[in-house]
Image (cartoon, rainbow, N blue to C red):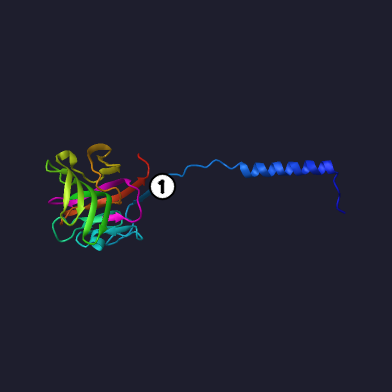
Amino acid sequence: MRSVLPATAFLVLIAGCSKKENTETTAAPAAKPPAPHVASYSTKFPKTEDPISEDGRWIGGKTIALDWGNVSTKPGYATGVAGPKRFADSVALLTGDWPANQSVELVVDKRKVKLYPEVSMRLRSSLGKHNCDGYEISYSLRDDDTAYLIIVRWNGALADFTYLVNTQGKQYAVKTGDVVKTTIVGSEIKTYKNGVLMGSAKDNTYIHGSPGFGFNERNNGDYGISSVSVTATDGTTF
């Protein structure tokens, strides 16, 4: 049997329900600012691949840009296969939409070298048919005073590049186990060897692009890297 409330009790009940409904509709939780987009990737090259792909994460200089070279891997080791012409460096870039501020870190694996071996880090780079642009930071594997550090802006076409830093000295030589790292934040490029700042440059030509790595033109012996670690953020610091 349905019960009937007195009129005064019914009005109190209605008022209470109305107050509760108003509280629920107006008391929304405070909005949180969106977290900055952060991207990272690291590998010790678990597969034998020529060119490196790692399930589509990498693209190569020869495969995409035609005039440059690709990077190949076997477990624990990556090395370059340069193109046939002068300045046809081997290049591997990560796929995806990377934030502008980027960091690339390599661990060197020096074996038997000759001529002008160098390991390179790429920042804000892109590949297209007959086009390779972005920033390259390279350390020499020579072990004397002819070793060098260069920071280069690739302008697009093969052999079209601009030196931002071109310095020489034994202190820039790298060997097995050395860790080299390069960052770009805003327009400033900084590069480190085993945690020590070795050089810097400023350039604002490229504001977008992908990180990656590579090696010098031609056959310069048996050398490469044992790992690469890349991080990026939309913030201003790493």
Residue 135 x %, y %: 24, 48
Magenta run includes residue 12:
no
- Quarter of the image containing the N terminus? bottom right
Report if residue 101 lies within the magenta region: yes
* Vertical placement of residue 127 versus 18, above or below: below
Q: Which residue is drawn at 86% across and 53% down?
A: 2
| Residue sticking out furthest to the right | 1
Specify whether residue 184 is in view. Answer: yes
Report x, y in % for residue 81.
21, 59
Please rate how many residues cluster around mark 1, counting C-alpha atoms within 10 Å: few if below 14, some from 14 to 19, many from 20.
few
Q: Which residue in the structure is indicated by mark 1? A: 37
Which residue is nearer to you in this view: 173 or 15? 15
Q: Which residue is drawn at 47% across and 42% down?
A: 33
Question: Where does residue 38 sit, x and y in percent of width and height?
Answer: 40, 47
Q: Which amino acid does label 1 sit on?
A: His
Secondary structure character of the magenta stretch overall:
strand
Left-right relation of 23 to 184: right
Quadrant where the C terminus sits is top left
Given residues 45 and 118, the one toward you in this image is 118
User: What is the magenta range?
Assistant: 92-116
Q: Which residue is at 34% across, 57% downward?
A: 57
Classify mark 1: helix, strand or loop. Answer: loop
